[in-house]
Image (cartoon, rainbow, N blue to C red):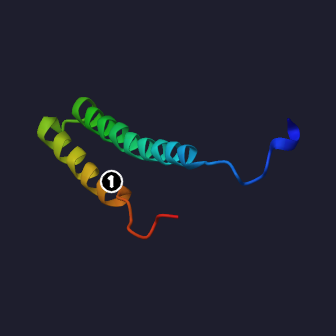
Amino acid sequence: MAGDYHRGEMDIHEQAATYAAFGKMTKWGSLAIATLLLFITLLFCTPTGFIGSFIAAAVLVAVGVMALKEKPGSAH
């Protein structure tokens, strides 16, 4: 029972893939929520209007996508 365990022999590819997927969903979901909050706040709480709110949200999405893109050398 307890003697059957050997440190470092377990296959952890599924756990690593799940961790990576959770990280990606977290960062992209955060960008989506921030964009939605910016759009709704500008639309309803300022005289910016729909077009101005949409432009500000589009700029946030563009900057966010550039910042959150996977870098080629970031794989461990």
- Residue 43, percent from left and from top: 22, 33
- Residue 68, percent from left and from top: 37, 56
| Badge count | 1
Name the image quarter holding residue 42. Answer: top left
* Above or below, 38 relative to 67: above
Q: Residue at x 32, y 53 (%)?
A: 64
- Residue 29, percent from left and from top: 39, 39
* Above or below, 48 relative to 69: above
Instruction: Specify whether 29 is left or right of 12.
Output: left
Viewer-proximal residue, 33 or 1? 1
* Above or below, 32 relative to 67: above
What is the secondary structure assignment of the residue under circle 1? Answer: helix
Q: Residue at x 43, y 47 (%)?
A: 24
Q: Which residue is mark 1?
A: 64
Viewer-proximal residue, 19 or 57? 19
Viewer-proximal residue, 23 or 58? 23
Amino acid marked by disc 1: Gly
| Circle 1 crowding by C-alpha within 10 Å: few under 14, some 14–19, many from 20 | some
Residue at the farthest left position = 51
> Which image quadrant: the N terminus?
top right
Viewer-proximal residue, 8 or 55? 8
* Above or below, 44 relative to 52: above
Q: Residue at x 25, y 29 (%)?
A: 44
Q: Residue at x 87, y 38 (%)?
A: 2
